Structures are given as structure tokens and as C-alpha cells.
Amino acid sequence: MTSQMGERHPGGDAESEAAAQVAQAAEDFEQPSQEMRELFGVAFSAAEHFADMLVAEGELRGLVGPRELPRLWSRHIVNSTAVVPFLPRRGSVADVGSGAGFPGIVVALMRPDLEVTLIDTMERRVEWLELVVAELDLDNVTIRRARAEEIKDRYDAVTARAVANLSKLVRLTSGLLRPGGSLLALKGAKAQQEVDDAKYVIKKAKLEPAVIHEVVTPGEELTRVVEVRRRRG
């Protein structure tokens, strides 16, 4: 007596394996908590779309490392919201070294009343930012491919994340600040050391002494925002 094997489809196994990998990847990625959803409010849907785009293309485009993707929400997206409480009530913001869109895209989502300029030097990053802005229909965003020091416009605030140490950042961005404008730099545990090292540079740029704000974001993440303000008048 012989038994008959079921017919095999060569492509079936590969497709099933790919589907399983996608499903496993989805499980591995951090899901936004209720507190995160409430933080974004009406902007949450767009923030989630942004996150989905990063999961799908961020690693392929060299924007986010594979080890960063599992904590995309807390380490990158929500972390970027730490600058929002220190933004001006109205006016313009420049995000220097926007890269994947941190914190610039997040700022634009949460403060649609502000005019946000995303600045980056690399063509592939600029192309990514243009795609995100179009997908999310962000009509308050302008994208500039340039070095910060090449831009002659002045802004009410300048944001930066993972661009350079504070001394270099002040040299790059002080010329972008209007009187009364602030540099808002997202920094880690060495924020105080960077502030101490940058005191002379800050004074030479005729800016007020740096202030470190400690912000606890959803997920109990402690983020430090270094604020350096240009004096009025």
C-alpha cells in the first residue's frame, strides 16, 4: 500500500516564511502605550503613520539602526516630544540635521501652528523627509538641503538631536537665532559636561548661559533638553 504526498508549491514555503518574519517583526516592535497616544492627541494618527514608514524603510535607507527599531516609539518618537514645551508660542523653528525626522517631523506634527524648516545636507535624507512630508500632508514644513551655517534666515527656535556636541552645535546654529530665540538641543546623560565645556563658546556667541531641562516622557524615559537663548535687543 502506498501513500500519496500532497503536492508541493516551491514558492509557498518562501512566502510563508516571509509572512512569518513580518509577523514576528511586528511583535518585536514597541507598541505605543495609551499615555503615548494621549501625548500626541489629535496628531497620533499621523505619528503612527510616521512610525510605520520608519519600520518599513528606516533601516533600508540607513536612517535608523536595526537595534533602535524595537524601541522606536520611546527612544526616538516620544523622546523628540521633549522639546515641545519649550517651543515659542508662535513663529518659526529650524530643525538642524533632521535626518530621519527627529525631532523636526514630531515638532511639525504636534505644533501645526509653527512654521518648521527641516535642514539636512544629505540628498538621501532630504528625499526621505520630502516623502514623509508628502505622506503626512504637512503644509507647515519647508525642507532645505544645506549646511546650517549657509542659511541666512533667522528663526525663533532651533532644534537639534544627535548632531554634534554642544560647543560645535552653538557654533553651527547661533547665527540662525533671532533676538530672543532659543537653541533647544536634545542631550543624554552627559548634558552637564557638554554645557560646562561649551561655556566659553556660548559666551563668545553672545548667548545667555545654558539651562538644562529634565523631562520625563511616557515610558519613564528621562530626557535632557539644553536651552541656550539669544538675548533680546
Image (spheres, rainbow, N blue to C red):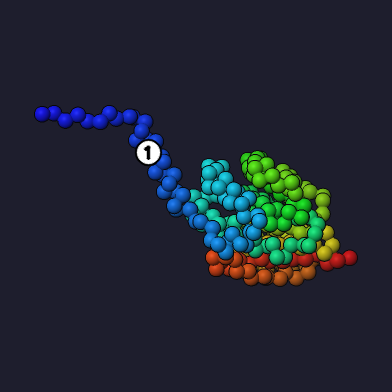
Say which residue label 1 marks: 16
Side of 232 relative to 114 (left or right): right
Q: Position of residue 132 (x, y in %)?
A: 64, 44
Residue 226: quadrant of the picture: bottom right
What residue is rendered at 59% in x and 59% in y? Answer: 37
Does the image show residue 79? Answer: no
Q: Position of residue 75 (x, y in %)?
A: 55, 59
Does the image show residue 81? Answer: yes
Task: Assign the C terminus to one quadrant of the image.
Answer: bottom right
Count of numbered marks: 1
Q: In this view of the protein, which residue sits in the foreground, 230 or 37?
A: 37
What residue is rendered at 63% in x and 59% in y? Answer: 40
Above or below — where is 135 with respect to 156?
Answer: above
Above or below — where is 148 with respect to 80?
Answer: above
Q: Secondary structure at mark 1?
A: helix
What residue is rendered at 27% in x and 28% in y? Answer: 7
What residue is rendered at 83% in x and 67% in y? Answer: 231
Task: Assign the N terminus to one quadrant of the image.
Answer: top left
Outermost residue on the left side: it is 1
Q: Position of residue 27 (x, y in %)?
A: 44, 52
Residue 195: quadrant of the picture: bottom right
Above or below — where is 78 with respect to 126?
Answer: below
Indicate the amino acid at tag 1.
Answer: Ser
Q: In this view of the protein, which residue sits in the foreground, 52 or 163?
A: 52
Q: In this view of the protein, which residue sits in the foreground, 86 or 30?
A: 30
